[in-house]
Image (cartoon, helix red, strand yellow):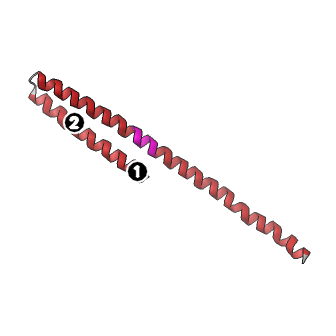
Amino acid sequence: MKYAIAAIAPIALALGACDGPAEEIGEEVDDVREAQAEVLDEQAELTEAQAELAEEQADIAAERGDETGETALERRADDLEAEADNLEDKADDI
């Protein structure tokens, strides 16, 4: 019986050790995904700031009577806001 236990113990330890590297790899994958989500969130914030800038520029164009410029800048702001929303959605999906 002692020999059976002695023979099984290394096998049991080896099988138990298999979870270690697999678990570490899983944690690394989770860390990478979290970092990707954070990058997308930051890109979304930058895009939102660019949209706000375009809105401010549209206001300036309106004050100057530049309807064409105002319209183009408002459209740009809307596009940037949509892009920011898409980036936030992608970050949430990760």
Name the residue rendered at 15%, 25% in the picture. Answer: 61
Label ID, residue 37: none
In magenta, the rendered stretch is 37-42
User: Which of the 4 quarters of the picture holds residue 19?
Assistant: bottom right
Q: Where 75 falls versus 29 (above or below)? A: above
Disc 2 residue type (three-letter): Arg
Give the percent coordinates (x, y) of residue 81.
27, 40
Left-right relation of 24 to 52? right
Where is the N terminus found, in terms of image quarters? bottom right
Left-right relation of 42 to 60? right
Disc 1 residue type (three-letter): Asp
Q: Rate crowding at label 2 as few (under 14), some (14 to 19) or many (20 or more) other CA atoms within 10 Å.
A: some
User: Which of the 4 quarters of the picture holds residue 20?
Assistant: bottom right
Q: Rate crowding at label 1 as few (under 14), some (14 to 19) or many (20 or more) other CA atoms within 10 Å.
A: few
Tags 1 and 2 in contact by the CB under 8 Å rule?
no
Badge nearest the viewer, 1 or 2: 1
Q: Earlier in the sequence, mark 1 or mark 2?
A: 2
Which residue is the site of mark 2?
76
Name the residue rendered at 90%, 74% in the picture. Answer: 3
| Inter-mark Cα distance, 1 to 2 | 24 Å
State the residue lying farthest toward the top: 64
Element at label 1: helix
Name the residue rendered at 9%, 29% in the picture. Answer: 67
Q: Is residue 74 magenta?
A: no
Give the percent coordinates (x, y) of residue 41.
40, 42
Which residue is the site of mark 1?
92
Q: Where 22 falls versus 69 (above or below)? A: below
User: Which of the 4 quarters of the picture holds residue 54?
Assistant: top left
Q: Is residue 41 magenta?
A: yes
